[in-house]
Image (cartoon, grey):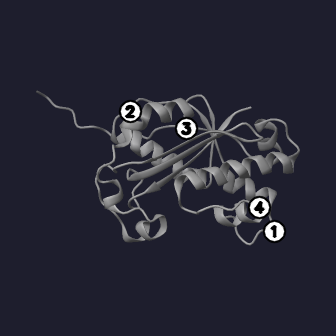
Amino acid sequence: MKYTAIDFETADKKPASACAVGIVTGDGRKIIKETYHLMRPPRMVFDDDCIRVNQIHPADVENEPEFPAFWEELAEALDGSIVFAHNAPFDMGVLSAMMDWYDIPDIHFQWGCTVKLSRVLWKDMPNHRLNTVAGMLGFSFHHHQALDDARACEFIVRKAMEKTGSRTLDGMMGAAGQIWHPFTVRRTPKAVSLF
């Protein structure tokens, strides 16, 4: 069994503004691979609220490579995999927007959301934010640091396997009444030159 947890941090509130990514691959018992990159976002537009949350400033990334420089490594971790994120629609939206911005060909994987899992499996928690869920399950980490957030997400998947008594990811998702979602890239029409 192998699965991947992913987390993006963004420079502003638009999805095509990734400035950091953390990816953690687990096998249900332990982490087997980690990847972390700061990256220069496409537009270098930073929002004060985003800076306050993730502590990534323009000076931290202005000399970093852009998203395509890391694509081969990211695609290797994601393509054909099972992928989790906490509030996964956000992270899947960022990935889709970045792939669209740079016109990167599609990859294919199924994804699940650990927010939805945790709402079903740990109903009595005061909320289901990543820091709350992971913390109450016994995982200490630096919230809104992409690699730490991906580690926390991977930990929640492990705990969900334990909670449901499942030996497979399909079994865990089924026990929690969850379904897999196919990853798709929303493509924006590109201008076509007539000359």
**Is residue 187 visible in this depiction of the protein?**
no
Q: Which image quadrant is residue 31 in? A: top right
Marked residue nearer the N-terminal end (1 or 4): 1
Can you tell which of label 3 and label 2 is closer to the viewer? Answer: 2
Give the crowd class for mark 1: few <14, some 14-19, many >=20 residues within 10 Å: few
Give the crowd class for mark 2: few <14, some 14-19, many >=20 residues within 10 Å: few
Viewer-side residue, 135 vs 32: 32
Q: Position of residue 130 (x, y in %)?
A: 65, 61
Q: Which residue is mark 1?
A: 124
Separation of residues labelled 2 and 4 (CA atoms): 38 Å
Marked residue nearer the N-terminal end (3 or 4): 4
Marked residue nearer the N-terminal end (2 or 4): 2
Residue 138's disc number: 4
Separation of residues labelled 1 and 4 (CA atoms): 16 Å
Can you tell which of label 1 and label 4 is closer to the viewer? Answer: 4
Marked residue nearer the N-terminal end (3 or 1): 1
Q: Secondary structure at mark 1?
A: loop
Q: Label 3 amino acid?
A: Phe
